[in-house]
Image (cartoon, grey):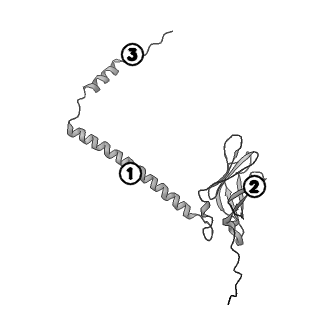
Amino acid sequence: MKVSSPKPSSDDKAAEEEVEKIPPYDEATQALIDAAQKAREQFDEVEKSLKEMEESIRNLEKEISFDFGPNGEFSYMYGQCYELATNEYIYRLCPFNRVSQKPKHGGSETSLGTWGSWAGSDDNKFSIMKYEHGTGCWQGPNRSTTVKLSCGKETIVTSTTEPSRCEYSMEFVTPAACHEPKDLGHDEL
């Protein structure tokens, strides 16, 4: 069966002829049209730049709102992510942002929580990070993660476990968790 393309209607032909009959603008009008187009393009560029600056300001305001420790020692981790690969999953910790797991052999990423707060004891507040409101477990709570920090030479996730259903625990080693020794009091001359 042969299918023929539709024939243009008389209305389509009339519209095309109408466009062809529009005379060109005089020089002054065309100059105004060109100037308006240039102004629109410049406005769009400035508006884009303004939106980028506003986003940058929001990000900086968010960053300075974090408690990075008494001397800001944890600030270097902001914007960084650290991974630990196990037999089944790749765990990803992005301090002050989120924790996730992704199946090692394909599949979608699952949120194990977003930054909540420091959760260490009063005398060692900066020893535990709490991440909350992760992806909900089937017929269960939303996932959450407790990250226990300890002193070490490099910044690395050393282990991840799931001690209770949908509640994860991570061990995270970092030089930022090292404490200076107490002043031993010297009696030099």
Give the amino acid at mark 1.
Answer: Val
**Marked residue nearer the N-terminal end (2 or 3):** 3
Label 2 crowd bin: few (<14), some (14–19), many (20+), radius 10 Å: some
> What is the distance, in whole Å, between disc 1 and disc 3 at their CAs?
46 Å
How far across and down, in percent of the image, does residue 41 sit? 35, 45
Which residue position holds label 2?
159
**Marked residue nearer the N-terminal end (1 or 3):** 3
Q: Residue at x 42, y 49 (%)?
A: 48
Label 1 crowd bin: few (<14), some (14–19), many (20+), radius 10 Å: few
The answer to whether the residue labelled 1 contacts the one labelled 2, judged by CB atoms less than 8 Å apart, is no
How far across and down, in percent of the image, does residue 57 sit? 48, 59
Q: Residue at x 70, y 54 (%)?
A: 144
Where on the picture, by quarter, is residue 163?
bottom right
Considering the image in quadrants, where does the C terminus appear?
A: bottom right
Which residue position holds label 3?
7
Q: Residue at x 27, y 40 (%)?
A: 33
Q: Residue furthest right?
A: 163
Give the amino acid at mark 2.
Answer: Ser
Element marked by disc 1: helix
Give the answer, above or below, for where 104 lies relative to 179. above
How far across and down, in percent of the image, does residue 7 sit? 39, 15
The answer to whether the residue labelled 2 contacts the one labelled 3, judged by CB atoms less than 8 Å apart, is no
How far across and down, in percent of the image, does residue 98 sit? 64, 54
Which residue position holds label 1?
46
Element marked by disc 3: loop
Viewer-closest of 185 and 7: 185
